[in-house]
Image (cartoon, helix red, strand yellow):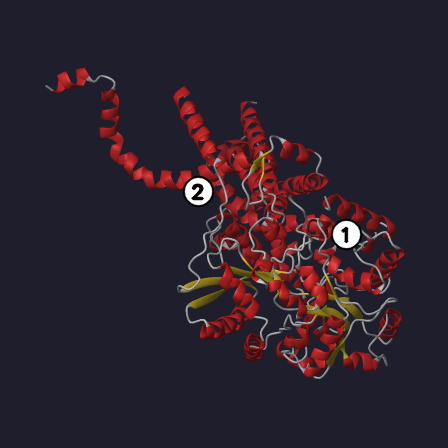
Amino acid sequence: MRRTTAVCGTVLVALLSAACATSGQSETRQADQNAPAALSFWSTGGDDETAIFQKAADLYKQSHPNVTIKVQTLTWDDAYAKLLAAASSRSGPDILSGGMTWTIQFGARGAMVDLRKHGLDALKAQAQPAQWESAVSPDGSVYGVPLDMSTFALFYRKDLLDQAKVTPPKTWEELVAAIDKLRAAGVRKPYSQDWGNLDWIGYFNYLYQAGGSFYTPDCKPALGTPQAQQALTFWADLYRKHGAPTATVEGSDALDTGTALVVAGNWIAKGIDVNKPELKGKWAMTTLPAGPAGPTTFIGGRAIGVTSFSKYAQIGADFVKFLYSDEAITAIVDEAKKRNLPFIPPRADKVVSASTFTPEQAQVFEASIRTGKAAPGCPGWDESAGDVAKQLQSAILGKADVRTALAEAAKVMERNAG
Amino acid sequence: MANTADMATPAASPLRSALRRYGTSYLMLLPFLALFAGFLLWPLANSLFLSFTRFDGINPAEFTGLDNFRRLAGDARFRHALGNTALYVVASVGLGTLLSLGLALAFNGTSRPHRIMRTLFFLPSVTSSIALMLMWKWVLFPSDVGLANTVVGWFGGHAVAWLATPGLTVPILVLMSVWGGMGYGMVLYVAGLGSIPEEYYEAARIDGASTWQQFRRITLPLLRPVTTYVVVTGLIGAFQVFEAVYIVFRGTNNVGGVLDSGLMIVPYLYDQGFTHFRLGYASAIAWVLFVIIFVLSLVNLRLGRAMKEL
């Protein structure tokens, strides 16, 4: 018994000593950039999206015969954990794409290349300014650049609006009036929100439309303002007084099951006619109703960057730059059209001309993007986002008043700002 | 000659003879031991070490002593997760054990209908938990297209926001757990019931014992080892609940669902480790969870033994 204990103890100590030796980083030695190179690009999204970026990679190979880039799919659900495992073992992809703030998060921990070293800060001139700002780290490092854009639109059922003699609302007041009229006309589900339901992204639109923001320009929490309170009061009232469902129903399902007005992400526009053929001709879309300070709408999307453990950092950066070229965007968009994929290029001048949407739809998105804002890039925002969403939920669900919820959210942001 | 050699190296002989006797066996065990050490002992030791460090998964771990455990003590979200988990464990293990026993008593025969019912109730235990959770998500789908709301509609009720009503989160998680686990408990209880000699019941009946008295004085005491096993394994499984929360309730930016109403210890651990790059802190949570499960299992085993001696 004593011997067994001793053996177990020795094994544990040995293992712990070995465990203490875990990790340790060194600069990745770069391979000869002129020799044949095989790079891997982990693309967060679906297989169809992988295929459209593979088209761009194949095109890149035509002008760089020595370089082969293999694009692989990472599903949204497990992408973050897989990327963390890759960064931890420093053996993952050369190029990665994911949520807008992911490259900042990984970059801050030394897992991404600052693309300024490779001159990619020049892409700022082509990108949508607010989205670019969101992709850049608080210290100015460029660990990732926008890969595509997404935004909101108000989708509506034309037949139900006609039945209630309602025109698509252009302002907050018109939205509330439209909901009341629709309900009076017997429409059981006048309004719902898909993307951002009960989440900070949903509040984002109302906050900026009221003239508020999450942070001041010097990154101090700014949720104590009358604008922030006005926005949250209006948003919470949509749930509490006007019957917006707290449970999230996917946009096209909501339209299909008789919801008249649906706030959703641009991507659903591609799938409605295909997945819900009975809705063909019955739906349309417009920009979100404007608030007292204007129509500011959230801009999201994906970012792309080069990992610091890549042996081909220069080539990776060059490929990322190539994705902003006319020929790459054309190749991506052509393939996306063939696959009926939603895709808005990251270049501000291409939102309409290189869109996979119909010209009318693209115009709506362009209008939203033109005045759009993106997620705050202030220190601590990523750590705070979940708790901020929880405070917003407590106001909507009547667990706290608007002022208290916002004060608590601001406290979290202050604490995480460091 | 051999004897002389053995006398010359007296210390080596027992080892040599042990090797000669068991060498092949140890050799056969080697692949398992290598896997056991590589995939269990090593990560375990690593996680213990990391629980005393600040480690983001990318940069070298920095030793911080007991900081992670001190921070845990003051972490309101961890306490919330602990409270939710405790409620879930008590309800799901309690209800699950009772229903397993009930099902075993109802379907412990050898007739075809009993065998069919046992198979039906056991099916969720052999189905992929991811598939089951996706099915539940579909059942609880909001609006009137989900199965649960369709049934509510048949009775004239309004659609319920099953996944966005904080008060319903833990009861739904308990329901999913009990539904998925009671078939497994039932099979164990059926085996336990089969091992109770029929003579005990005959003697009791001759002495005039009622059915309830037979159940209370014979069945329940003799099923105690099975109950202990069902409760201990149930406790361990319930404390580690993850898929149900992660797949069914993680709808917003928050791993615990609306207002953290479904936040449990393991999803919180995952969130801290793999979303917020706090792998040292996540390791500390894992070790606290281990201690809780270990102590509760020990108490349960001791309790079972003490009751046997009564």
| Residue that appears at 72% across and 49% down | A384
Q: Viewer-proximal residue, A73 or A26?
A: A26
- Give percent across and percent down for residue A405: 82, 50
- Give percent across and percent down for residue A408: 81, 46
Chain letter belonging to callout 2:
B
| Residue that appears at 65% across and 48% down | B174
Q: Viewer-proximal residue, A14 or A190?
A: A14
Q: Amino acid at mark 2?
A: Phe
Q: Nearer the viewer, mark 2 or mark 1?
A: 1
Q: Mark 2 sits on what residue?
A: B39
Residue B56 is left or right of residue A214, and the answer is: left
- Give percent across and percent down for residue A312: 47, 59
Chain letter belonging to callout 1:
A
Query: Dot 1 lies on which element?
Result: loop
> In this rendering, is residue B167 above or below A287?
above
Residue B229 visible, this angle: yes
**Crowd around label 1: few <14 · some 14–19 · many ≥20 (10 Å):** some
Residue A7 is left or right of residue A118, and the answer is: left
Q: Name the outermost residue toward the left.
A: B1
Q: For the residues marked 2 and 1, what is the alpha-carbon distance in whole angstroms?
A: 44 Å
> In this rendering, is residue B137 above or below B278?
below
Residue A338 is left or right of residue A155, and the answer is: left
Q: Amino acid at mark 1?
A: Cys
Q: Which mark is residue A219?
A: 1
